Image (cartoon, rainbow, N blue to C red):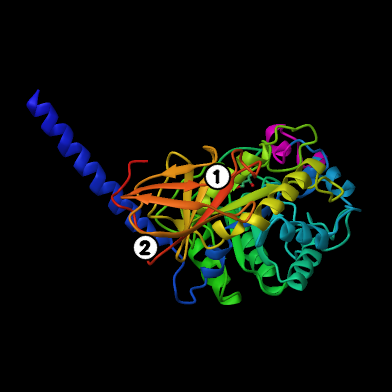
Amino acid sequence: MKLTLKLLTVALVLFAITSKSFAQNLDKATLPEQNNSKIQWWQEARFGMFIHWGVYSIPGRGGWEMYQEHIPFSEYAAFADQFNPKAYNPKEWVTKAKEAGMKYIVLTTRHHDGFCLFDSKVSDFTAPKTGAKRDLIAEFADACHEAGMRMGFYYSLQDWHFPGILPQGGPVSPSNMKLLREQAHAQVRELLTNYGVVDILWFDAPAPDDPESWRSKELFEMARKLQPNIIINDRAGLPGDFATPENVVSAQARPWESCFTMNRTWGYARYDRNYKPVHEIVRLLASCASQSGNFLLNVSPDGEGAIPIEQVEIMNAMGKWMQVNGKAIYGAGPSPVVAPNLGMTSRVKDKVYLLIQRWPGSTVPFAWCGSKVKSACLLATGQYARIEQKGDRMWLHDLPQYPSDPYLNVIELTFEGEPKASEPAYQ
Ligand code: GLC
């Protein structure tokens, strides 16, 4: 019995030590650097827009139609002739992203079906050479640059329309691999040469999945030469500048960005109405930011280039929330002061934000607070709480009985000196 108790104590102490040092390492590794590192703007940004748009937006069944339905290229090509997006207005997309509080946009310049929204000398399966008869990426790049919006290019290495590649099946022959690789290198060169400053290169889906087949190192070197300040993700078989967990919040000890769909599909899906509620999307954003991660939220315009109304409504709601509460998100990282009874906490410079998912009523209690709190402001109403602090226990009084914000309420804490925990808290 005594031995079990001893073992339990040792285990608990070890747990406390390791979880503390993990949090400290996470802090050091992922908080924005003081110096002008290339990725600093991105770590400040925390919130971006992902756009999946292409020929698959015509059939409108999610983006994977060609592969999942074994559509032969000759049949699939007809969608490209119908793809002439009359409602395409990238300026409006940029405005919507800005209003939602998003600081960058990543657009699929080419998805797995191989269709290029841009003009390419090495492919005929492009917007300028089919129905649209124009370079849709040129218009997008102009809109971003004009509005000062940071711009990212998504590029799928996988290319289903290429002979010998999925969905036709089978391993890629060395001669096909060479052609595929050369096409990818040439197109990445085009993308990084013809559209002014590109801030992010967002690779996806290398098939085969090894950096040698793609000569990824050379690809990276070329990208960095053409765009010296570009940041590159981790999906070309190399670690790149940041990690990209997908549809999951998974904190990493390096810069990371979780990308999420709003419903269940990346590309436009006419009948996918399984939208996440706004409070869930706000929670995901806050969860990423409070762990030094970014949140890339996907929209999927239809074949005409219009963003579905449900998605616009979600973005509008996000915008309203960010306008009031964005201070807790931009440039945020983990806070030493935690409040597991309330929800999450984030830290930006010397401020700590309580991101309250479970509103407790007119008095907000929490603990493990190791430094003196000077003021506590509920951002939704601008009200200041009356503060009571006893040892490491805190009570914020005179707040509204009911939660003021419908999604997530934020209280900004200002400290005398450094915010500190009294001791590591088990969360
Ligand atoms: C997955 C999907 C792809 C999508 C990507 C976004 O890899 O297969 O369609 O573009 O996620 O992260």
In the picture of the structure, the residue carrying the numbered disc 1 is 246
Which quarter of the rendering shows the N terminus?
top left
Residue 388 rendering spot, x and y as whole percentages: 42, 50
Image height check: is 273 above or below 134?
above
> Mark 1 near mark 2, Cβ–Cβ under 8 Å?
no
The total of numbered circles placed on residues is: 2
Q: Residue furthest top?
A: 1
Judge: label 1 CB < 8 Å from ligand 1.
yes
Task: Give the spatial CA distance, label 1 vs label 2.
Answer: 24 Å
| Amino acid under disc 1 | Glu
- At 52% from the left and 69% from the top, the residue drawn is 40
Question: In the image shown, does 79 or 325 lie closer to the viewer?
Answer: 325
Image height check: is 417 above or below 410?
below
Question: In the image shown, does 151 or 3 lie closer to the viewer?
Answer: 3
Which quarter of the rendering shows the C terminus?
top left
| Amino acid under disc 2 | Lys
Say if the magenta span includes residue 74.
yes
Label of residue 28 in the image: 2
Q: Taking 179 as reference, is 421 left or right?
A: left
Q: Residue furthest left?
A: 2
- At 60% from the left and 75% from the top, the residue drawn is 226
Q: Earlier in the sequence, mark 1 or mark 2?
A: 2
Q: Taking 21 as reference, is 87 left or right?
A: right
Q: Residue furthest right?
A: 86
Crowding at dot 2, Cα within 10 Å, few <14 / some 14-19 / many 20+, comes out as few
Q: Quadrant of ligand 1?
A: top right
- At 67% from the left and 65% from the top, the residue drawn is 151
Query: Which segment did they paint magenta?
Result: 62-75
Q: Taking 93 as reference, is 335 left or right?
A: left
Question: In the image shown, does 259 or 65 lie closer to the viewer?
Answer: 259
Say if the magenta span includes residue 270.
no
